[in-house]
Amino acid sequence: ELTNTFREVVGVDSSEAFINAAEEMKKEGQRAFSRKEEGEIESHLMASIDVTIDRTRCSFLVDDPCSMAARNYGEFDAVLVSDCLDRIHAPAECLERLVGEPGLVKVGGIVVVASRTRWTERRTRKDKWLGGTVNSAGKEEYAMDGIKSIFEERMELLTTLDMPLLIRNDARNYQYSIVEASVWKRKA
């Protein structure tokens, strides 16, 4: 879908399996998958890409979002950081790489950050969390506070919104979450 707006789209994930699936979708325009219904019962389905989407304008790379650098990738007009901040080992470093010098986001470029803010020490050391903590003075610190502290000097907050997300586990069980999203514009 992003190729309808941007000349080039680069998808990055630390999961080789996800990138392989994306590459198959790009090459074939479709991909078979199984969906759990109940217990061992599965449905076999086919995901397909709308034929009007120019798949040649996208590429996919396996990389650690915390170590990506502009010198390796160049600068982007827009970056989407979706559902990963609370799942990576160094979320502040990931955001800093977007706006540092040189940053992955061009001056005037847009960053969209979307997170369920489900901080857990299984994924991220507590001292690296951007929020979900109470500081020594007893003040509650939320993920948006952490994001603002990283972006405030170099980014303008355009809007925030809560976005519903429904994930199907099986035919009768779903996860319902509210994703906290924020849209930022890089200052000159």
Image (cartoon, grey):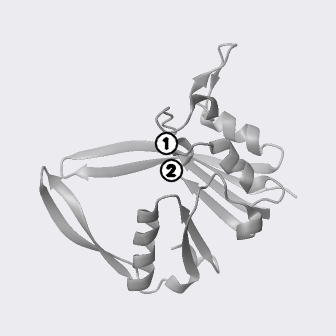
Circle 1: is it few (<14), some (14-19), or many (20+) Cα within 10 Å? many
Residue at horizontal 59 percent and vertical 24 percent from the top: 133
How far across and down, in percent of the image, does residue 23 sit? Answer: 45, 76
Which one is nearer the viewer's eye here, 51 or 164? 51
Residue at horizontal 34 percent and vertical 79 percent from the top: 30
- Classify the position of the C terminus by image quarter: bottom right
How far across and down, in percent of the image, does residue 70 sit? Answer: 75, 64
Residue found farthest to the top: 137
**Number of callouts:** 2
Name the amino acid, label 2: Asp
Which one is nearer the viewer's eye here, 159 or 147? 147
Name the amino acid, label 1: Arg
Q: Considering the numbered disc 2 on the image, is that residue within a helix, a strand or a loop?
A: loop
Residue at horizontal 36 percent and vertical 43 percent from the top: 176
Circle 2: is it few (<14), some (14-19), or many (20+) Cα within 10 Å? some
CA distance for labels 2 and 1 = 6 Å
* Residue indicated by mark 2: 83
Residue found farthest to the right: 188
Discs 2, 1 touching: Cβ within 8 Å: yes
In the rendered image, which quarter is residue 111 located in?
bottom right
How far across and down, in percent of the image, does residue 125 sit? Answer: 57, 33
Query: Please, is residue 87 above or below residue 12 in the view?
Result: above
Residue at horizontal 19 percent and vertical 69 percent from the top: 44
Q: Considering the numbered disc 1 on the image, is that residue within a helix, a strand or a loop?
A: loop
* Residue indicated by mark 1: 116
In the rendered image, which quarter is residue 57 located in?
bottom right
- Residue 76 is at least partly visible in this image: no
How far across and down, in percent of the image, does residue 178 sit? Answer: 45, 42
Circle on res. 125: none
